[in-house]
Amino acid sequence: MQYKSVKGMEDILPDGVRIWQEVERLARLELESAGYREIRTPVLEESPLFVRSIGEATDIVSKEMFTFEDRKGRPLTMRPEGTAPIVRAYIEHSLNSVYSEAEGLLYYIGPMFRAERPQKGRSRQFHQIGVERIGSRSPQVDAEVIIRLDRLLKRLGLDNFKIKLNSLGCKTDKENFSGKLKEYLDGNKSGLCDDCKDRIEKNVLRVLDCKSETCKAVLKNAPDMSGSLCGKCADHFAAVRAMLQVAGVEFEIAKNLVRGLDYYTGPVFEVTHQALGSQDAIGAGGRYDNLVKELGGPDVGAVGFAIGIERVIMALGDKKDILKPKIIYFAVLGNTARDRCLKLSEEVSKSINDDPCKLKAVVLVGLEGSSLKSQMRNADKQGAKFMIIMGEDEIARGEVAIRDMETKQQENKKFSEIIEHLKNNLG
Ligand code: HAM
């Protein structure tokens, strides 16, 4: 019997993990430097937390949660997202009173679970880097969170992504608009797909982001959400847009963007990337001003986002290799070379990896006794950028041969020049 990983849950193999580590390091750097602090919550939560916050009629709660009973019959769910658990922890530990100003600048990195149909860019265990900024209703905070998202994606090396922005308005606006939309759709039901006919009763806003062409045609004349915003929500949204413009964040208004989780109110956003297929959202978020109170906490506003690590890496394409450390391979030919290499390889590794937070180069040493050809093959297999050949003759001259494995150019360098040469050419 050969076992395989659970459907939709993938192993991340060592070569991939190097990229993940760098993504996580860069994310921590971006977020910590802006005052966010990491929070780690359990993977399991009591099921009602998600039902209450994400909403009973959403796809996530109605069909995608991994829910089971523990030994005492209590329903537990593997977290499908991070916002509800973070809010739960914020309330449970009274973080608002513990940290005053810095209270709710929180971020998290970790696995989430949704029993969706697996396909490219969609898995059942996936990983998010998320931010929750709890404690303020100011539009400045929405803008800061979106700026952070933009800077984070750029720091990870992404470009050509699109930030789409909309506002759902406050609870009353949302209810008013849902009523108007329902009325319109009830009168145009025949043109809708079966799912949307269902959604009219259960979750009418979701009809707006249906991908079916017939539904899109019906929606052309549907009431406009922006026309349903109250004065306060319209002003809030305008202020957010103005601040994003000042900060140089490019965005477009997407008037049918509604999001698949019920807790949102006010501005919502989604980031898409053209390199991805049908699952083109690399991240999303928005304001959720009622959730903290609804879950038993203080009446404070909040806003956040999450990006999917798998999708970010997929969108990076070949550029993801920049995130990997370079490999320097020492080929040793003979005992003298081996002994000299013990010291030299360590010196090289130490001086190149001079930043304690970033692994710039991995230094590998070939096995003395194996031929140059086999060490060269091994270096190639490991994806080495440079091979340093230490033969008896070179050593006698106080030199090594440095071979660029990509260009196949080889030159001799004095021991004293090696580190400088590698530093200048490692890229
Ligand atoms: P979400 O839109 O459900 O929002 O997920 C955010 C991101 O997680 C998506 O844009 C996507 O990149 C990734 N993602 C979601 N599902 C999958 C999947 N099955 N496979 C691979 N990647 C996936 C939230 O989760 C909210 N909690 C975001 C938020 C934070 N809003 C406020 N604060």
Image (cartoon, rainbow, N blue to C red):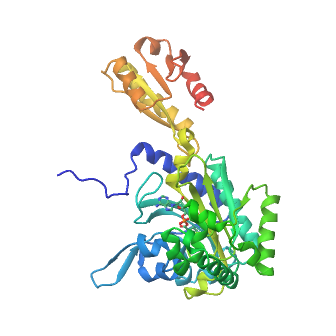
* Left or right, residue 287 beside residue 129: right
Task: State the image coordinates of residue 217 (x, y, percent, origin top left).
Answer: 63, 63
Quadrant (top left, top right, bottom left, bottom right) of the C terminus: top right
Compared across the picture, whether 177 is left or right of 118 comes to: right
The residue lying at 55 percent from left, 78 percent from top is 200
Can residue 18 be seen here? The reply is yes
Name, please, the residue furthest toward the left. 1
Counting labels gives: 0
Residue 264: x and y, percent?
A: 62, 75
**In the rendered image, the vertical position of residue 301 relative to residue 217, given as above or below:** below
Q: Which of the 4 image quarters holds residue 322? A: top right
- Residue 242: x and y in percent read 82, 64
Q: Which of 402 and 147 is in front in this view?
A: 147
Residue at 54%, 42% (x, y): give it: 317
Q: Is residue 309 above or below residue 210?
A: above
The residue at the point 81 percent across, 70 percent down is 239
Using the image as rendered, state which of residue 184 and residue 228 is in the foreground.
Answer: 184
Picture quadrant where residue 187 is located = bottom right
User: Is residue 352 or residue 119 the one in the foreground?
Assistant: 119
Q: Which residue is drawn at 40% across and 20% down?
A: 337
Front one among 71 and 375: 71
Whole-percent x, y for residue 400 in the image: 49, 18
The reply to whether residue 43 is in sight is no
